[in-house]
Image (cartoon, coloured by chain):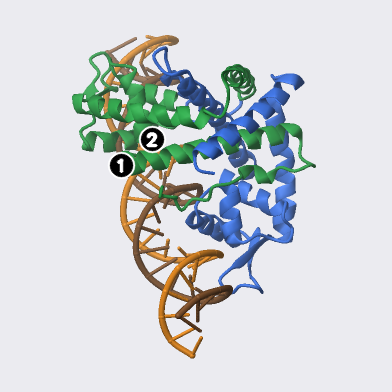
Chain colours: A blue, B green, C orange, D brown
Amino acid sequence: MSKKPAVAASDTETRATSEHAPDLRLWLRTLACTNLIENHIRSRLRAEFGITLPRFDLMSQLERSPQGLKMGELSKRMMVTGGNVTGITDQLVAEGLVVREDSPKDRRAYIVKLTPEGRRSFRKMAESHETWIVELFAGMDEKQRGQLYDLLAALKRSASKAAGK
Amino acid sequence: MSKKPAVAASDTETRATSEHAPDLRLWLRTLACTNLIENHIRSRLRAEFGITLPRFDLMSQLERSPQGLKMGELSKRMMVTGGNVTGITDQLVAEGLVVREDSPKDRRAYIVKLTPEGRRSFRKMAESHETWIVELFAGMDEKQRGQLYDLLAALKRSASKAAGK
DNA sequence: TTTTGATATTTTAGGCGTCGATATATTAAT
DNA sequence: ATTAATATATCGACGCCTAAAATATCAAAA
């Protein structure tokens, strides 16, 4: 009996029908995929490790930057506002998974780093996380995944340009 | 001078590097695209119409179902929890854009419908919304968009199956 | 040096979103 | 007809998230 979360499983995409522009349907399908996967990952992280997705994401950024990151860097990379990063960091600090160190170069700034426990904890979770992702994409063959990867690069360029970089 | 929101513009994808599995990089790229587009749409809806994305989404569902939808239907289609729908609906009711009618068939349920004003208001916003989406995808050619559409269908199938329908 | 403008972070207020619990109604089984 | 199981929606607590304003520092120009 795998636990079904209270959140419903289906179709954001239901919004789109014949009269809508193809681009709109394409966008809604993109969204549906993302929501599906994100909701799944979110609930598994919660169920199996008692952590939230944003906290996991922040730790993930830090694990890849052992020298640490400034709050503003985290904000850019996570694509969320600075105020948001403040809150998430506060929580992780309280849990002992992360530390704020004063920047020697700039007294306005902090350098956020994983603690040894944070690093240990993250690596364990990341392993499962990667497995889950692999499972979610397993229904596509190698070639499809490669094509999708390339097309998303094109989409990223297109949207970045239209959104004003 | 187009207004730049306080939210940073770049790369969730920064998380992925060489040592990560290809699937993980594919997922992070998907996420980066979605965030980019969603953030853009969110701030334009706010700036130009003073509405939030979730409220727009809910109205969007209702516009396509003139007979109205039960709270639970909205929850499924929007891929969010029931409690969440309650809150968003409350706000839209307070703004006079939506009504909760008692279901004649089932006294537990409500049927939510757009008011005439809600419908009028939505149609005006939807026009702009669609234009924005078209702009965001404009950097891809017809063929690329078609391929992406098909590949996302495959992803949706794959992820739905792995997530347990 | 003082001012000016930009940058780094936090704070505040309010909306979104989840989970788990509750109240109520429906449906099925006894 | 009573009971039990299931379904619909709301509520409360808590965390995420944004936008806008406040605070502090830096860097460069006057």
Q: Is residue A4 in view? A: no
Residue depicted at x 73% and y 33%: A131
Q: Secondary structure at mark 1?
A: loop
For disc 1, the chain is B
Residue A143 image point, x, y percent: 75, 20
Q: Are marks 1 and 2 on the same chain?
A: yes
Q: Position of residue A51 (x, y in %)?
A: 60, 46
Q: Residue at x 29, y 25 (%)?
A: B123
The chain holding disc 2 is B
Q: Distance between the Cα atoms at labels 1 and 2?
A: 12 Å
Residue A138, above or below A81: above
Name the mark on residue B35: none
Identify whether B131 is placed above or below B10. above
For residue C17, what is the image quadrant? top left
- The residue under label 2 is B54
Res. B111 image quadrant: top left
Choose between A160 and C30: the one closer to the eye: A160
Q: Which of these two is toward me, B71 or B127?
A: B127
Q: Residue furthest right?
A: B19
Q: Amino acid at mark 1?
A: Gly
Figure quadrant of residue B120: top left
User: From where the camera sits, is residue B153 visible?
Assistant: yes
Give how far across and how far down residue D7 sits, in percent. 40, 19
